[in-house]
Image: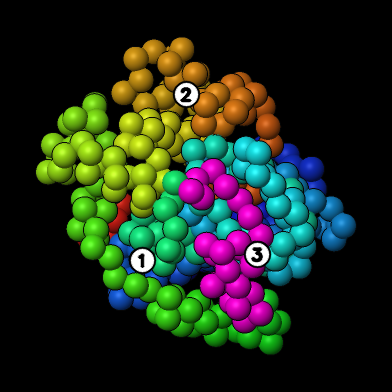
Amino acid sequence: MGEVCDNPAGTPAPETYRLTAEFREPPAQFEGCFTTFYHLSLDLDDPAATLTDYLQPEWANIRFFCGSTPDAAIGGSRVKGARFIGTGPSALPCRFTVGPVRMWGVGFLPLGWARFFGADASACANGICDGAQHPTFAHFAPLADALCDPEASMDAQFDAIVAAMTKAMRPTRDDARIARVHAELVRGDHGTVNELADACAMSIRTLERVCTRNFGFPPKLLMRRQRFMRSLTTFMLHRGSRWTEAMDADYHDQAQFTREFREFMTMNPSEYAALQHPILTSFMEARARVWGSAAQTLDPPSGA
């Protein structure tokens, strides 16, 4: 499933560019583990040019870059020049600058984190790294050669990802709990941690343990991040809309929304709206059309 996105009408970018995004559904044996396997091609009229954009808070990802490599940062973590980048779950934006590139990415839902990584997700939260050099991500480093092989077809590269994931997957004892918490977070109709724990049929202590280890953050922050991402996604998908129109109904007032916007995006809403989003806007619109969800954090666990 693919989309070709040129410069959006009425949205000037620093350079004329062409973005192609393709989203592939993971095989059934990985149900509930991944957002999508996705491929992005970015072409610029000037091959020496770059674009800068901000990724919103998301789940953990591994990304393989063929061509230019990004200069990217989340909070105080920064990586430059790596063709394999790993990120943990985030509650902060990722600022990146990149030139012409072909990129494969894999987004891990919380169940995917539990099955494919040995580390506590909170230890990697809001972190970005050279995946080949980081013990949590390094077991996926051999994929870089296969995914950057210019002779390999897209299907062959997709098969390489599937083979690597099949080899790496391990069962966990918390599968059912993780899926239940994830479904309730996406549903988003719980006002307190107590209500979320009751809906998940678990104690607050168990809920906090499951969330911190597999989702990367405490349940209260995860609930607030979901509320924020519903608002940000609405704004990004409706060009020309006002923040007051995009703001989730669960916010008490605009002041509360502005405070949380600063927390999750490290800038206020007007500053964010004034920035160009040459990659993210096109990518989110394509993802919404093709996949049905514009952002990873809004993807439900399979079957939910």
**Residue lying at 85% horizontally and 60% vertically, measured from the top left:** 47
Part of the protein shown in magenta: 123-147
CB under 8 Å between callouts 3 and 2? no
**Residue lying at 51% horizontally and 31% vertically, measured from the top left:** 264
**Residue lying at 64% horizontally and 67% vertically, measured from the top left:** 132
| Residue at mark 2 | 260
Q: Position of residue 151 (x, y in %)?
A: 69, 87
Q: How is the image coloured?
A: rainbow
User: For the residue carrying disc 2, how many other residues have a C-alpha within 10 Å: few (<14), some (14-19), or many (20+)?
Assistant: many
> Does the magenta run of residues contain 145?
yes
The answer to whether 55 appears left or right of 253 in the picture is right
Q: Any mark on residue 133, and which?
A: 3
| Residue at mark 1 | 115
> Does the magenta run of residues contain 20?
no
Q: Position of residue 118 (x, y in %)?
A: 42, 63
Q: Amino acid at mark 3?
A: Gln
